[in-house]
Image: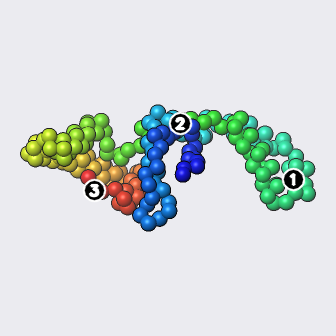
């Protein structure tokens, strides 16, 4: 019998059903639905906005604390907890937060609006072809066009970086390190 289901937000799961034992085990399988509205509310992450922080006030707040007296006679763990409490209070007053959004993440340097549209057409064509709504010939053309434009855009960026490498080494090495990171998990375009 199911006793308890734990979630980090009320109303996150619904329609909970026991589905019988798992093989010869005495453990029961549980089926449930994750409710979309509750899940969306969880995805609003916040992060510290250091560009708008008041570091002068932060330094003053931490400088006013008599650390010798505050930490006198305390062990390492107690001292750490006291310091951490003061640090978090000062952080809360001096460093504002901003909402973190995956839509604002920086894309590849060669991606522009026109190219993004071509990539979306390519994905839609693929989806249609997989579902059997589009013939292979109709699918093939947007894929070739999108792939060709991505190659050209990458080549133009790489040529301009190579041409300007003496004047702008930082952007060249940033591009190279970003490309190395991408080779680990993402498939080629």
Q: Which residue is mark 2?
A: 11
Instruction: Name the residue at 80% across, 49% down.
Output: 82
Label pair 1/3, CB-CB below 8 angstroms: no
Mark found first going from the N terminus, 2 or 3: 2
* Residue 188 circle label: 3
Label pair 2/1, CB-CB below 8 angstroms: no
Question: Mark 3, residues whose alpha carbon is within 10 Å: few (<14), some, or many (≥20)?
Answer: few
Mark found first going from the N terminus, 1 or 3: 1
Mark found first going from the N terminus, 2 or 1: 2
State which quadrant residue 75 falls in: bottom right
Q: How is the image coloured?
A: rainbow
Look at the picture and state if 72 lies above or below 95: below
Which residue, as the protein is rendered here, is positioned at the far bottom? 24
Number of numbered tags placed on the structure image: 3
Q: Position of residue 175 (x, y in %)?
A: 39, 53
Instruction: Name the residue at 26% across, 39% down.
Output: 120
Instruction: Name the residue at 48% across, 56% down.
Output: 28
Give the structural element (helix, strand or loop) at label 3.
loop
Q: Which residue is mark 1?
A: 71
Give the structural element (helix, strand or loop) at label 2.
loop
* Residue 138 circle label: none
């Amino acid at each position: 019998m199911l006793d308890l289901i734990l979630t980090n937000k009320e109303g996150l799961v619904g329609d909970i059903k026991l589905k019988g034992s798992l093989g010869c085990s005495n453990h029961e399988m549980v089926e449930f639905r994750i409710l979309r509205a509750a899940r969306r509310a969880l995805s609003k992450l916040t992060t510290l906005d250091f560009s708008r922080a008041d570091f002068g006030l932060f330094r003053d707040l931490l400088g006013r604390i008599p650390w010798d007296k505050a930490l006198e006679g305390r062990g390492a763990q107690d001292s750490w907890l006291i310091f951490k409490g003061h640090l978090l209070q000062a952080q809360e007053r001096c460093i504002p937060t901003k909402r973190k959004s995956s839509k604002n993440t920086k894309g590849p340097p060669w991606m522009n609006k026109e190219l993004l549209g071509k990539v979306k057409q390519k994905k839609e064509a693929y989806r249609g072809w997989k579902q059997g709504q589009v013939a292979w010939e109709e699918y093939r053309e947007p894929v070739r066009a999108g792939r060709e434009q991505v190659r050209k855009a990458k080549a133009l960026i790489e040529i301009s970086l190579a041409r300007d490498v003496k004047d702008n080494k930082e952007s060249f090495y940033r591009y190279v390190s970003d490309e190395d990171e991408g080779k680990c998990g993402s498939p080629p375009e």
